[in-house]
Image (spheres, helix red, strand yellow):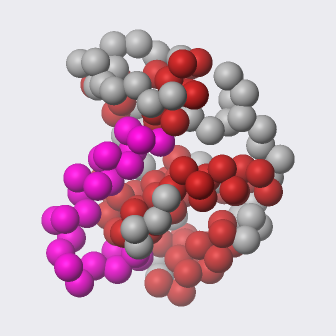
Amino acid sequence: MPPYLLSNDAFTEFLRLFLAGELPRAEWNHAAHLAVAAATIHAGGDIRDRILAYNATQGIVSTPEYGYHETLTRFWVDRIQDLLPALGRQATAFDAARAAVAAFAHRGRLFDHYYSFDLPSNRHARAIYVAPDK
């Protein structure tokens, strides 16, 4: 488990750094994406806007080959949305983040079971949501 998921206080600080655009870019990995997405979805927020805002603070410019990926984001949002109801009504954003990372951080290419093409490198899927075709 990443250190920011070892306590609620550590997670609160992690989210503060992310939202302020101060999270080191080297720490913006798959698990961090999942944790932020789960907390955002739990709170009813828009993860797309949060990722784009963070990327802007880090100088990450989206191009057809790099940066924000609409289909990958929506794919992971759907997985997280499927997971959250099982946590129950009393679950917190911290609980949601821990559950998402535990369930999916090690499954980085889970999308290969849903897409017949190389999703990460697909330029069209980067710009516009493409539904799974498997």
The residue segment tinted magenta is: 73-95
Residue 102 x, y percent position in the rendering: 34, 58
Residue situated furthest right in the rendering: 59
Residue 79 x, y percent position in the rendering: 30, 47
Judge from the rendering whether residue 33 lies leftward or rightward of residue 94; answer left or right: right
Q: Residue at x 78, y 38 (%)?
A: 61
- Position of the N terminus, as image quadrant, is bottom left
Q: Is residue 80 above or below residue 110?
A: below
The quadrant in which residue 14 appears is bottom right
Residue situated furthest top in the rendering: 117
Specify whether residue 2 is in view: yes
Residue 10 x, y percent position in the rendering: 56, 80
Residue 93 x, y percent position in the rendering: 40, 75
Q: Is residue 108 above or below residue 97?
A: above
Q: Is residue 96 above or below residue 37?
A: below
Q: Residue at x 52, y 36 (%)?
A: 70
- Position of the C terminus, as image quadrant, is top left
Q: Is residue 106 above or below residue 38?
A: above
**In the rendered picture of this protein, how many numbered marks are placed on residues?**
0
Q: Is residue 33 magenta?
A: no
Specify whether residue 104 is in view: no
Residue closest to the eye, 95 or 84: 84
Magenta stretch: dominant SS?
Answer: helix
Q: Residue at x 53, y 77 (%)?
A: 11
Q: Is residue 79 magenta?
A: yes
Q: Residue at x 68, y 22 (%)?
A: 65
